[in-house]
Image (spheres, grey):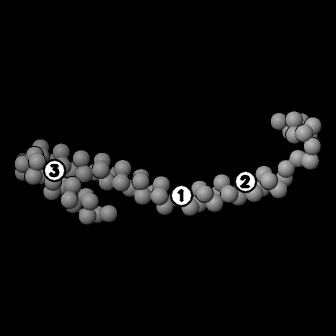
Amino acid sequence: MEIFFVLGFFVMLLLTGVSLLGIILALIVASIVMMFAGLLVVVIKMLPWLALAVAAVWIYRAYRKPSSKAERWLSR
């Protein structure tokens, strides 16, 4: 993941030139890109756990299914 930060930093330096303003701008843009890339990685990493939670709730609700429709409306 750090390679994206380094590549983004050098690309921004090439586009803006090597000045103090260019370096600050490159750091800001690279930090923003890394933040969104990190958030995407967290979402992908959490996806199996979210799917497991959905499956557990689905199984739990199927197991605790009301026996009649009258009881179903009373529970709401």
Q: Residue at label 3?
A: 12
Q: In the rendered view, would you say 16 is above or below 53?
A: above
- Judge by depth and name the residue closer to the eye, 76 or 31: 76
Residue 20 visible in rendering: no
In the drawing, what numbered circle is on residue 47?
Answer: 1
- Helix, strand or loop under label 3: helix
How many other residues sit within 10 Å of disc 2, few (<14), some (14-19) or many (≥20)?
A: few
**Identity, as a three-letter code, of the amino acid under mark 1:** Leu
Q: Are marks 1 and 2 in contact (CB under 8 Å)?
A: no
- Mark 3 crowdedness (10 Å alpha carbons): few <14, some 14-19, many ≥20: many
Q: Earlier in the sequence, mark 1 or mark 2?
A: 1
The mark nearer the N terminus, 1 or 3, is 3
- Residue drawn at (18%, 49%), measured in percent from left and top? 26
Horizontal arrangement in the rendering, residue 68 relative to residue 39 (left or right): right
Disc 2, SS? helix
Q: Amino acid under label 2?
A: Trp
Give the mark toward the camera: 2 or 3: 2
Mark 2 touching mark 3, by CB under 8 A? no
Would you say residue 51 is visible in this rendering?
A: yes
| Quadrant location, the N terminus | bottom left
Q: Which residue is mark 2?
A: 58
Task: Please report whichever mark, 2 or 3, sits nearer to the chain's N-terminal start.
Answer: 3
Q: Which mark is residue 73?
A: none
